[in-house]
Image (spheres, rainbow, N blue to C red):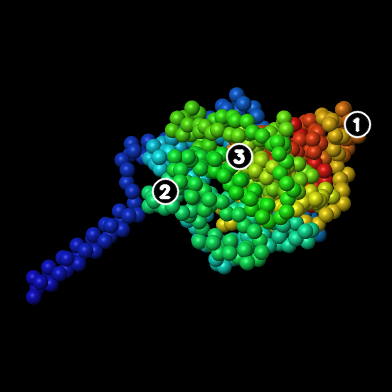
């Protein structure tokens, strides 16, 4: 028995020793002395190199220092406040708001020379490995897809009560969306019906709905449009509520099957091609005439001329690849620009049809988008109807942006709905799953300027002022559009051109991003002294109204007549 006991004891000791050894090895990493020194030197070198590179760039480009320091100043007023209570000084709001921290982080990220140098190269490397980025996903055969579009198609049912509850939950965010599209649409229908105006809702299918096989081979041979699970119930509930719905998806799926050689969506962009857009416009014109009794077409008033346009797709630009890359070259389209008489088509305020739309309406209409002008969806709807059409369009946020624009006009005493028989509300289908379907008031108010300064019509005035507040600007490349406008509240105005401006405040829209490059206005912070050329917003609204913009949240400011700052 003794030999057996000795053998068992030895095995136990060996087992314990191995466990101890494993624990020791898991808790310790040993390097040769030379390796340790090299890793420390490399780590310290990286830490030092980044600020040195930034300082060197600042010496060559002083505006980087201005932008960096502006970010620091922006944080101070909101959190470095103290107050005295019973003679005791105490600090309040020791932490700045998270939204302000995010804005400053974005500013610093945009001024990082290391980021500017490395990001395109890193993205090129990821591309060679078959990877896109957080916004742009690689498809098959050179197709690119916007992540929000794929999330809509592949995500959970947007009308699922659990999904609606989660999206509506504030989670500490006071700006949680109203996620139920049915509530927002029904309210808008009721508001229009009270004035005897009919409504047509038009959800435009996103690219992966029509071309799912260009993202995944599992969808090869699928002849029907792919939608979110809640899409059909959504349409059914609107129909039961008496709301007309024009869904172009079956029409586009049929066109794709009958003529597969004619692309209906751009390969490297989120939007449709001119043939798909014109097909949908002609179909909608028929539905509009079935919904309300419109005047007879005006023969000979509208005509078209052809034009070829070449441009880089918005999803390709979101990849932030090096300049001159050839992996995703520009795409070419053939447009039909619409003429009203001898001039390019423009919205007509007196028309009986009002169209509310997003970038699917703007892409061939809004020249800053780079795909031409006067050849968009509303132009071709007007051509198909043979009638003038009024339009309010804004890139992005189709769930609420154009309704907000309409609501604010009404609240300022400008009745954009007078004489209207029909409103057509177009939005990208992805908004159904991710949009904010705000309930908005459509009450007609009285004209109100809030004492704000605006130059007289047709006049441009040079002013100096101090920024009181500025709306947020997006980071270039983080959104599927390349131009953006911010709203700025200016105070303590001075002007040699117009003494009437002295001491007044003004509200101005200003460029914050042009062609995916941030402007000085994107960095405006309270207290900054600025020099602008102001003209009435009404003088340029027809040209710039469709461009995506952010606005301040002060109701008094929003009701004031704005200016345009150049």
Q: Please identify the residue farthest to the right as the structure is shown.
A: 500
Image coordinates for residue 503, horizontal then vertical, percent: 88, 37
Whether residue 122 appears in this view of the structure is no
Q: Secondary structure at mark 1?
A: helix
Give the residue number, with chain letter if any, for mark 1.
499
Q: Which residue is at a point 57% across and 54% down the rendered structure image?
A: 247
Label pair 1/2, CB-CB below 8 angstroms: no
Work out which quarter of the rendered image holds the C terminus and state it: top right
Image coordinates for residue 507, horizontal then vertical, percent: 80, 41
Give the residue number, with chain letter if any, for mark 2.
213
Q: CA distance from mark 3 to mark 1?
A: 41 Å
Q: CA distance from mark 3 to mark 2?
A: 24 Å
Instruction: Determine which of the numbered discs, if any, sits on residue 526 in the image.
Output: none
Image coordinates for residue 481, horizontal then vertical, percent: 60, 40
Label pair 3/1, CB-CB below 8 angstroms: no
Q: Between 171 and 365, which is closer to the camera in this rendering?
A: 365
Q: How many numbered circles are shown? A: 3
Image coordinates for residue 541, horizontal then vertical, percent: 75, 38
Q: Secondary structure at mark 3?
A: loop
Work out which quarter of the rendered image holds the N terminus and state it: bottom left
Label pair 3/2, CB-CB below 8 angstroms: no
Q: Which residue is at a point 76% across and 45% down the rendered structure image?
A: 351
Instruction: Determine which of the numbered discs, if any, sits on residue 363 in the image.
Output: 3
Residue 548 position by quadrant: top right
Q: Please identify the residue farthest to the bottom as the structure is shown.
A: 1
How packed mark 2 is, by other alpha carbons closer than 10 Å (few <14, some 14-19, many 20 or more), is: some
Sequence-wise, the earlier of marks 1 and 2 is: 2
Image position of 298 with respect to 153: above or below: above
Sequence-wise, the earlier of marks 3 and 2 is: 2
Image position of 90 with respect to 51: above or below: below
């Amino acid at each position: 028995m003794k030999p057996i006991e000795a053998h068992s004891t030895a095995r136990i000791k060996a087992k314990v020793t191995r466990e101890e050894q494993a624990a020791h090895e898991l808790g310790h990493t040993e390097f040769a002395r030379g390796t340790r020194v090299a890793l420390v030197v490399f780590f310290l070198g990286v830490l030092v190199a980044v600020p040195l590179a930034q300082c060197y760039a600042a010496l060559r480009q002083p505006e980087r220092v201005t932008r960096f320091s502006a970010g620091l100043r922006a944080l101070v007023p909101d959190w470095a406040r103290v107050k005295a209570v019973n003679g005791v000084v105490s600090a309040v709001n020791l932490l700045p708001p998270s939204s302000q921290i995010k804005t400053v982080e974005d500013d610093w990220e945009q001024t990082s020379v290391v980021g500017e140098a490395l990001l395109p190269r890193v993205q090129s490397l990821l591309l060679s490995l078959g990877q896109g980025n957080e916004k742009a996903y690689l498809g098959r055969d050179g197709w690119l897809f916007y992540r929000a579009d794929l999330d809509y198609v592949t995500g959970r049912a947007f009308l699922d009560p659990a999904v609606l509850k989660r999206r509506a939950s504030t989670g500490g965010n006071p700006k949680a969306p109203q996620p139920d599209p049915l509530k927002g649409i029904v309210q808008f229908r009721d508001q229009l019906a009270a004035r005897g105006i009919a409504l047509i809702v038009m959800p435009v299918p996103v690219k992966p709905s029509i071309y799912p096989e260009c993202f995944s081979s599992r969808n090869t041979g699928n002849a029907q449009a792919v939608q979110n699970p809640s899409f059909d119930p959504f349409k059914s509930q609107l129909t039961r509520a008496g709301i007309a719905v024009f869904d172009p998806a079956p029409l586009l799926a049929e066109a794709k099957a009958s003529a597969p050689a004619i692309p209906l969506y751009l390969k490297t962009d989120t939007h449709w091609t001119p043939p798909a857009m014109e097909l949908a416009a002609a179909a909608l014109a028929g539905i509009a005439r079935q919904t309300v009794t419109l005047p007879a077409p005006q023969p000979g008033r509208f005509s078209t001329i052809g034009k070829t346009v070449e441009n880089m797709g918005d999803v390709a630009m979101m990849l932030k690849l090096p300049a001159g890359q050839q992996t995703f070259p520009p795409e070419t389209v053939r447009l039909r620009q619409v003429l009203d008489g001898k001039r390019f088509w423009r919205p007509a305020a007196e028309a009986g049809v009002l169209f509310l739309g997003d970038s699917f309406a703007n892409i061939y209409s809004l020249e800053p988008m780079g795909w031409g002008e006067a050849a968009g969806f509303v132009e071709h709807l007007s051509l198909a109807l043979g009638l003038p059409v009024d339009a309010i369009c804004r890139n992005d946020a189709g769930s609420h942006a154009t309704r907000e624009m309409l609501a604010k006009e009404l609240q300022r005493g400008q009745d954009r709905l007078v004489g209207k028989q029909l409103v057509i509300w177009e939005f990208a289908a992805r908004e159904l799953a991710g949009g904010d379907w705000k309930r908005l008031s459509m009450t007609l108010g009285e004209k109100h300027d809030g004492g704000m300064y605006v130059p007289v019509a047709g006049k441009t005035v040079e002013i100096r002022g101090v920024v009181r507040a500025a709306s947020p600007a997006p980071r270039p490349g983080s959104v599927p559009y390349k131009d953006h406008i911010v709203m700025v509240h200016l105070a303590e105005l001075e002007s040699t051109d117009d003494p009437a401006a002295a001491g007044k405040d003004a509200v101005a829209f200003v460029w914050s991003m042009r062609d995916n490059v941030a402007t000085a206005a994107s960095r405006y912070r309270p207290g900054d002294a600025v020099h602008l050329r102001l003209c009435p917003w009404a003088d340029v609204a027809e040209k710039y109204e469709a461009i995506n913009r952010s606005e301040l949240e002060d109701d008094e400011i929003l009701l004031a007549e704005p200016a345009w700052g150049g």
